[in-house]
Amino acid sequence: MREHSGIAANRITRLVGALLCLGVAAIHVTDQGGIPGSQSPQYIACLYWALEIVAVLTALLLLAGVIRPGWFLAMGVAAGPILGYVLTRGPGLPDDHGDVGNWTYPLGLVSLAFEGALLILAATCFLRATRRGPRRGGTRRGPRHAAARPR
């Protein structure tokens, strides 16, 4: 029974991660004015598109149970826009100084909430998955099963 509840918790956690990834993508589609959007300069529009595509693919990986790569990419889906927010509001980016000082942009704050939650969840799950190590053979054999092994 305990193993069953652990599997259910893992699925729920991956579902939450996938929904957060899709939320990040949806927020950025909204911010750019839809698809294909009207962000300028062009390199920022390309970064938006890349983020949106990777966020959707990451959500699919998490839902499919691809644990380590999924959580690793989810950390990037979260950290990339956080860095972008800080850079565009702080010093600004080349050819893009329109948001310098605009720290209270409502959609940006919603985005930071989604990205912060995703970053914490993804980092926790990724570290937990890497500490567990790969499973081999599907069963655990400890000292209790040593006598059952052929010699």
Image (tube, rainbow, N blue to C red):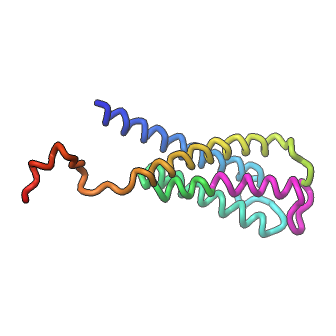
Count of numbered circles in the view: 0
Quadrant where the N terminus sits is top left
Q: Position of residue 113 (x, y in %)?
A: 70, 40
Q: Is residue 105 magenta?
A: no
Q: Position of residue 132 (x, y in %)?
A: 40, 50
* As drawn, 63 above or below 8: below
In the image, taking residue 107 as reference, residue 59 lies left or right, namely left
User: In the rendering, at what x and y percent does residue 138 appear?
Assistant: 25, 52
The quarter of the picture where the C terminus appears is bottom left
Residue displayed at 49% across by 40% down: 13
> Closest to the observer: 141 or 103?
141
59 displayed left or right of 39: left
Instruction: Tell whether position 92 is magenta.
Output: yes
Q: Is residue 41 left or right of residue 17?
A: right
Q: Residue at x 49, y 59 (%)?
A: 69
Q: Using residue 127 as the reference point, say whether residue 77 is left or right of it.
A: right
Identify the residue at image location x=52%, y=53%.
71
Q: Vertical placement of 47 versus 11: above or below?
A: below
Magenta part of the protein: which range? Answer: 77-99
* Residue 143 placement (x, y as % from top left): 19, 46
Residue sticking out furthest to the top: 1
In the picture, residue 53 is in which quadrant? bottom right
Q: Residue at x 67, y 54 (%)?
A: 79
